[in-house]
Amino acid sequence: MVSFPPEPFRIKMVEPIRLIDRSAREAALHRAGFNLFGLHAEDVFIDLLTDSGTGAMSQNQWSAMIQGDESYSGARSFFRLEEAIKEIFGFRFFMPTHQGRAAENILSAMLVKPGHYVPSNMHFDTTDANIRARGGAPTNLIIEEAYDPANRHPFKGNMDIQKLRAFIQEIGPANIPFGMITITNNAGGGQPVSMENMRAVADTYHEFGLPFFIDACRFAENAYFIKLREPGYANKSPLEIAQEIFTLADGATMSAKKDAIVNIGGFLAMNDEDLFRRSCNEEILREGFTTYGGLAGRDLEAIAVGLREGLDETYLAYRLGQTAYLAERLMDVDVCIIEPPGGHAVYVDSGHLFPHIPPAEFPGQALAVELYREGGIRSVEIGSVMFAHLDPRTGEMVYPRLEMVRLALPRRVYTQSHMDYVVKIMTSIAARRETVRGYRFTYAPEVLRHFTAQFEPL
Ligand SMILES: Cc1ncc(COP(=O)(O)O)c(C=O)c1O
């Protein structure tokens, strides 16, 4: 019998959830245009849409919030956050932002010009869109194993160093304003990157004079995977591993809504003083003064505490254990997932579950709709709805290589019996898989279309 470490917390406040009946769920789906982002959250029973900003804060975070200093500039709360960021990330400069995409926007506004390319293992949707919005081309150079759902490579988020080197030589360093890597790789299964790979990536960027920025949303989960899986790290703490990771880079973008276990917030950090100065102006224009960046003082306090809680080893063992539990139970009932499971989510291979639905008819969207219809579970498609796009050179549609549905686990929110319920619902959908049909767009915006697109069943 698979199990995971008991929750290292007890529950002292509860938020009721309810399962509305099947006809109400059907009506809700129609009202939302079959886009689960359009549902009222109250009509969702188990919400696995995202792990972003949906975690439960601790008593220490809530009590720190009471001490928030709401001064416009130079607030005490900013310096508390600075202390935590200096200790963990070590960069010379940082600015709070309202979330991760704001940090990506500032970085892209400063550095990306039309015709530029920005390589990474895989950019997530907002990073991808922020680079495109400035006329740049985000480029994914992940190892080939990442595209094989059954391959159990321990670090499937690794970048292909040979591809990276060849890419820089082909494009020319002058057309690459900076290089990135996403830890863990959200767009590709929440898979970690090894320290060895990050060092090779850093060396390659630096050899060509390119600054290296880490998309650090899930740095603590990545650090714990390194501890569990990479030789030489078993006796290091997640904090020590995180510190080592960030010595390799020149900066980071961070959505604190993930591994800092807060409901809102993020930051942009860097070592380059000139870039920081220029970024401050953009920050003041778009986000707010540089010591609060679109957040309240109390939010800064919660991030400062959460960054350290997110690195707690007992918490991380439970966290990765819960994800692995859901993954293993789904595999027990022959539902294919991206193996091995990542840190924050289980990615179901919907292309495999519904071989009769082609990418152009969105097998992932079909599964996401079915999970809600059958059991009030909300998930998100990570496949052709999110990533298919027209190739401007050929005028043809380019489809992603995997059609997935992500079941993201909010931090410290759901219990083992919630996971068992998800497995039960997935089992009953799999049993009638051939009855499920695809979808087509009735409306699709140009960028980030998964958030607001509307569909109809085929
Ligand atoms: C890897 C990655 N980068 C960036 C972001 C953007 O962060 P935010 O939602 O805070 O803007 C996300 C959010 O899901 C993410 O997973």
Image (cartoon, rainbow, N blue to C red):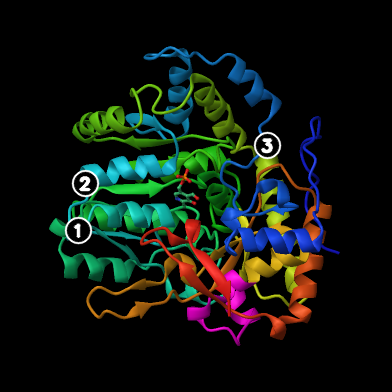
Dot 2 or dot 1: first in sequence order is: 2
Q: CA distance from mark 2 to mark 3?
A: 36 Å
Q: Judging from the image, what secondary structure is the residue with disc 1 in?
A: loop
Between 422 and 182, the one lying in front of the other is 422
Kindly tell me whether residue 54 is visible in this rendering: yes
Q: Height in image: 88 above or below 245?
A: above
Residue located 24% across and 73% down the image: 392
Q: To which residue does mark 1 refer?
A: 116
| Residue 352 belongs to the span the image colors magenta | yes
What numbered label is drawn on residue 70?
none
Q: Judging from the image, what secondary structure is the residue with disc 3 in?
A: loop
Q: Quadrant of residue 263?
A: top right
Residue kind at label 2, given as amino acid type: Leu
> Does the numbered disc 1 mark a residue whose Cβ is under 8 Å from ligand 1?
no
Query: Secondary structure of the magenta portion, mostly?
Result: helix
Dot 1 or dot 3: first in sequence order is: 3
Q: Identify the magenta region.
A: 349-366
Q: Height in image: 114 above or below 266?
A: below
Residue situated furthest right in the rendering: 1
Callout 2 touching callout 1 (CB < 8 Å): yes
Q: To which residue does mark 2 refer?
A: 111
Q: To which residue does mark 3 refer?
A: 56
Callout 2 touching callout 3 (CB < 8 Å): no
Residue located 48% across and 69% down the image: 442
Q: Residues within 10 Å of mark 3 (few under 14, many from 20)?
A: some
